[in-house]
Image (tube, helix red, strand yellow):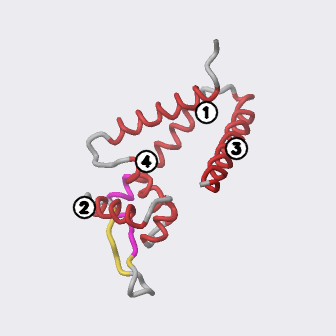
Amino acid sequence: MNPLLLDRLLQIADLFQKDMARAFDGTGLTPARVHLLWALQHAGPSTQQSLATLCAVSPRNITGLVDALERSGHVRRTPHPTDRRAVLVELTPSAVTTMTRMQQEHVELNETLTSAIAPEDRQAVERGITALVERLAALVDDAESAT
């Protein structure tokens, strides 16, 4: 019997988790911390409140993540230029270098994975994956609305 599509998707998720764990081993970075760094790389300096929204975590959780990343030298807090009550979280220069390298590795992995698909099938695969993501997101939203 062939594996279900869901089984293959779970296998892909597991392989990505293992690859991330290998890549971050010994760095002190966790998937949640990298997610925050990724958000900062794309959004630029941000308040903790906006980071909590971007990362879909509680304000308390974002404080812990920012504290840990500040201790490890990945981010720094700076005064907000227009709101004296707020602070901005920004990447340090070394974290910008790390995130730039990570973005490049992301592009390279995308190219490597895409090259495993026949060129004439790539658009169909992209449409299929997009449809799966949209359907799963709708199911998750519906389940969250029901609780």
User: Residue 93 in magenta?
Assistant: yes
Q: Which residue is mark 3?
A: 135
Please state which of the two labelled residues, at mark 1 or mark 3, is closer to the viewer: 3
Report how far apart the C-alphas of labels 1 and 2 lie in the structure.
37 Å
Q: Which residue is mark 1?
A: 114
Q: Secondary structure at mark 4?
A: helix
Q: Which residue is mark 4?
A: 102
Q: Amino acid at mark 2?
A: Arg
Report how far apart the C-alphas of labels 1 and 3 lie in the structure.
22 Å
Q: Position of residue 90 (x, y in %)?
A: 39, 68
Left or right of residue 104, residue 7 in this image = right
Q: Looking at this view, is 50 or 141 the one in front?
A: 141
Q: Position of residue 145 (x, y in %)?
A: 64, 56
Q: Looking at this view, is 133 or 114 the one in front?
A: 133
Where 135 sits versus 86, above or below?
above
Q: Position of residue 91 (x, y in %)?
A: 37, 64
Please state which of the two labelled residues, at mark 2 or mark 4, is closer to the viewer: 2
At 39% from the left and 85% from the top, the residue drawn is 85
Q: Amino acid at mark 1?
A: Thr
Q: Amino acid at mark 3?
A: Arg
Which is nearer the N-term, disc 2 or disc 4? 2
